[in-house]
Amino acid sequence: MKEISKHYNPQETEKKWLAFWEKEGVFKYNPKNKNKIYSIDTPPPTVSGKMHIGHAYSYTHEDFIARYRRMKGENIFFPFGTDDNGLPTERLVEKLKKVRANKMKRQDFINLCNKTLKEITPDFIADWKKIGMSCDFSKIYSTIDDNCRRISQKLFIDLYKKEKVFRQEAPVVWCPHCQTAIAQAEMEDEEVETFFNDIVFKLKDGKKLIISTTRPELLSSCVAIFVHPKDKRYKNLVGKKAQVPIFGNWVQVLADNDIDMKKGTGAVMCCTFGDKADVEWFRKYKLPLVMSLDRAGIMTKKAKKYAGLSASVARAKIIEDLKKKKLIVNQKKISHTLNIHERCKTEVEILNSEQWYIKILDQKKELIELGEEIKWHPQFMRIRLENWIKGLSWDWCISRQRFFGVPFPIWYCRKCGEVKLADEKDLPVDPMSDKPKGKCNMCKSSKFTPEKDVMDTWATSSLTPQLALQLFYSEKEAQKLIPMTLRPQAHDIISTWLFYTVVRSQYHFEKIPWSEVMISGHVLDAQGRKMSKSLGNVVEPQEIFEKYGADALRFWAAGRSLGQNINFSEEEIQAGKKFLTKLWNVTRFVMMNLSLTTLEKMSKSYFSQSGKKKSTKDDISSKVVRDEADKWILAELQKLIETATKSFEKYDYSGAKLAIEKFFWIKLADNYIEIVKNRLYDESRKNKKSRESAKFTLYSVLFTLLRLLAPFIPFATEEIYQTFFRTKKCAKSIHLCGWPSVDEKLYDKEKIKTGKILLEIVVAMRKYKAERGLSMKAEIKKIEISCDAKTKKAIREIIDDLKAVGNIKNVKLKKSNKLTIKIF
RNA sequence: GGGCGCGUAGCUCAGUUGGUUAGAGCAUUUGUCUUACAAACAAAGGGUCAGAGGUUCGAGUCCUCUCGCGCCCACCA
């Protein structure tokens, strides 16, 4: 018997195997391996200082799949990277270093970002290792590193040459706080209370026209008034001019079908720009452009006496002035939803400015079809992409008036304005410090202005298949590996990362980026609410590691089906820990009963180097296994392998976990071990063959079970494998052992039926004893079982185990059509 | 307003293509030192499967409607 400690210590064990995996390069990717490649487009987490529980939840999901596929023998390409450029990183650095990018020299800020990333990234990544991600961490990309900048710029040039990207001056969604353009996907909703003001405009004939607005501060931007063409109240006013109060200019009254007659007074002012409708009218009726707000959200000169005020101050002031002049006739308190910037929660504005866009609006249909080409897990998530694409109303704005991002590889000719692209050989470039080669292609001038803007972070992270593949492959080879096998991610970024990656893959390679996607849900608190600092309900995975270990956390994460949100529950994590303890105890039991020589004999004869079962010729199961209970548990085990494998193939890891858990606890621990105990303890000679049968069964059931569990609890299973199962000839890690396959010879469905009867009798006996307050060891004098002939035969075959487990003196079998059990 | 998901035991969730008596964990109650495990084990109680209607020999499962919860999108004048 091997020495084995009484308690399982997850923290120590996990640390040990983490170091072992790294040292031995267990998860290192080998591009030369000839096996089928299973490639995963791992989400590069946005560097934020710390892994959160939602990360832990969804990343373990993809790791379950990766580990399963690896054991199946596929060549797993499971890279790792971090997304660390753009606004999220800028905001993190501003917070950590207590600076404001706007108030620093551009280059100083960029240097500070790079320096900060160097400081925090290793600790950040450590959590992904701790959770047991089986990625190849030996080569990691960062979306701001030289290679990623090069790829990103190169592919930008590709888009430019394919005319999929364009620059235009147009109204764009703008964040006044971050002072940059943003994309449609970066907006969130927020419900706010405000006043709906009825404001008096005067007509030439002195009559009044009352409009309703929530944004009176934009009066100075008013360029028209709209009414519905069928609105009788205003029908005779259409085509006439009205005077803007306070500012005195005259604007036309126009009719448009989009007007809601029931809303407010049914008359609305159009400002360039108050909202998206204004943009549409601006375009449709070719209205003049009057910008009353600047890039920082401050009123411009156009706002005359209100210039220099912030929008909200100006609003209060203008309402006051209008009231004094009795030009506000009604104020109604309303609550409405407006868009805020997801990064800083500032109310967004629409501003006219020059930006770079990737064309998407003209490709909606094609993009929806591409979504259909991908296999979705779960399927319903595809609809979310489709809905998003259908609802798109802006092309994808990728330029940001920021600092820490991938620069555009372009300059503009000072003379004719023509774009000058960087030479692909020179990438990555920073046009702010690098000079373009040659002269302007149009006018042959040699004076250029650099593009100051940087690309949005999604413009680079939408290229993760390339960023990851080019860690190991040349550009040409990498393209051959598109589509990758799997994109795993959570549902919140379907409209960004998933969508953008599809767009880029199509434009560059005319291919979908991956054949399959798996979408995880979110972690909510115990009450099902979002976790947030303000609610104080945030659970940190680091605390869970400390208290219960990563395996317990992973076990919990496998508890709900893919795509579903999960409520955090400490009890569930405790249940995971309990499972580990139980597994440990079962292992102790098995190992206490197997001698070292038996172990070696078994591993030699039964398992080949890879841990895969040997060919049938070497199969000793048919020679050794003789008792019915053993055949029963082995048959159940085959059924389990079948279920677990089928589930994993469907990305239904939770189904696999559930089946394994039930088998382990109910079939194996509660019943089989109880039944077989007595046979193991009886060391008499005549029992030798039965004892051997039990030993072999326990050995192979446990080893199979360990392999089935390895994707979920990689640390505990590794510990047990290394301590008890691994011999010189075996694979160096359980994660390199084969995935168990069903042994048809052992998959005897009749034996499963026999087992069912056996359990029924055992349960009846236990109930009998429990009801009388007896010990489970108490003797039963006589048990009478009435059953049909077939069952009778089956019971005869398991009668020794049955008598032993219940401590029964006499078993009497009677013939009957119905199974009844009487105990005396 | 549109789309998607969810509603099953006190709580958290399973429930395969419709098929015997709807399952598990936690919680509750009772019992048991049983040579793996008392942080364990055994047993028990607990359900109009949100509601209504329909299809079917048969519905937790399929269809229609209603109600409740969550998420995404739209509405923003």
Image (cartoon, grey):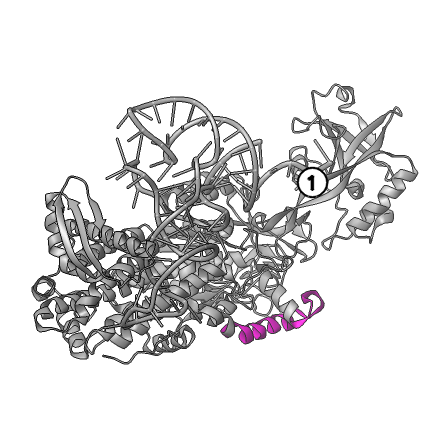
Seen as rendered, the residue at the extreme right is A324
Q: Is residue A423 above or below residue A753?
A: below
Q: Is residue A483 visible?
A: no
Q: Give the residues in magenta.
A: A97-122
Q: Which residue is labeled 1 in the image?
A: A336
Front residue of A644/A9: it is A9
Q: Quadrant of residue A486?
A: bottom left
Front residue of A361/A741: it is A741
Instruction: Say which amino acid is labelled 1.
Output: His
Q: Quadrant of residue A272?
A: top right
Q: Position of residue A75 (x, y in %)?
A: 28, 63
Q: Quadrant of residue A318?
A: top right
Q: Is residue A388 visible?
A: yes
Q: Position of residue B67 (x, y in %)?
A: 56, 33
Q: Is A769 contained in the magenta span?
A: no
Q: Is residue B70 left or right of residue A720?
A: right
How many numbered discs, if any? 1
User: At x 34% / y 56%, what residue is drawn?
Assistant: A657
Q: Is residue A106 above or below residue A645?
A: below
Q: Output the chain of dot 1.
A: A
Few, some or many residues within 10 Å of mark 1 (<14, 14–19, 20+): some
Under circle 1, the secondary element is: strand
Seen as rendered, the residue at the extreme bottom is A3
Position of the N terminus of chain A, as image quadrant, is: bottom left
Q: Is A99 contained in the magenta span?
A: yes
User: At x 67% / y 49%, what residue is drawn?
Assistant: A348
Q: Position of residue A328 (x, y in %)?
A: 86, 35
User: At x 53% / y 62%, what residue is drawn?
Assistant: A409
Q: Is residue B41 left or right of residue A342?
A: left
